[in-house]
Image: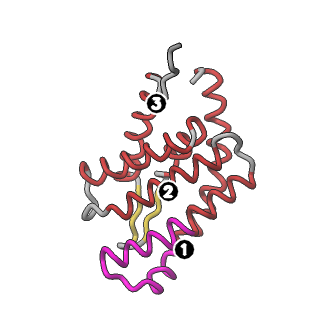
Amino acid sequence: MQKKPIFTTKMLAVMSLLVALEVIIARFGTLRPTESIKLSLDFIPVVVSAVLFGPVPAMIISILADVLGAFLFPVGPFFPGFTVTAALTGLLYGALLYQEQTMPRILLAVVLQQGILSLLLNTFWLKVLYGLPYLPTLVGRLVQAGVMSALQIVLIPLLAKAVKDVEKRAKL
């Protein structure tokens, strides 16, 4: 009996496109008003991969996009802590958004991603990397977390519906 492949050719092709899209958005479509604040739509490819493929592929896409983006288009020094956050973000979105995209699951994903991973963990990475004081940096990043949370709460349900519609038509 032949085993079913973990990743199909079509899945790998879509994942590759999502990695490329995330690198482009993260490196060229991001506003950085300060060293510690980043506003971006780079969550979109990760959410799309989470809805389509689940936690492990979404995590792989996040890791690859972070590492490739850091080496191809560096914004600062490469720091593996941010790659850890990217991996956890893909895993989190995949775990919560793969099977169903209800508003409670979306809210939980956004609150955990923005509150714990972006706000707390990334602020810690900024302290480690640049020596920024944790609490003042955290307070400054609250605005970013609020803006990004609102944006994600509005866009994720729209993205999930669009992805499901395309998935039906394309038979992904």
Front residue of this view, candidates 59 and 5: 5
Residue 158 rendering spot, x and y as whole percentages: 66, 43
Q: Which residue is mark 2?
A: 88
Chief secondary structure of the magenta portion: helix
Magenta highlight on residue 22: no
Mark 2 → mark 1, Cα distance in angstroms: 22 Å
- Magenta residue span: 116-142
Front residue (pair 137, 54): 54
Frontmost of labels 2 and 3 is 2
User: Residue 159: x, y in percent?
Assistant: 62, 42
Tag 2's secondary structure? helix
Residue type, mark 3 in image? Val
Kind of residue indicated by mark 1: Val
Which secondary structure lies at badge 3?
Answer: helix
Q: Earlier in the sequence, mark 1 or mark 3?
A: 3
Element type at mark 1:
helix
> Of the residues under marks 2 and 1, which one precedes in the sequence?
2
Front tag of 1 and 3:
3
Residue 127 is situated, as x and y percent measured from the top left of the image, at 37, 78
Give the crowd class for mark 3: few <14, some 14-19, many >=20 residues within 10 Å.
Answer: some
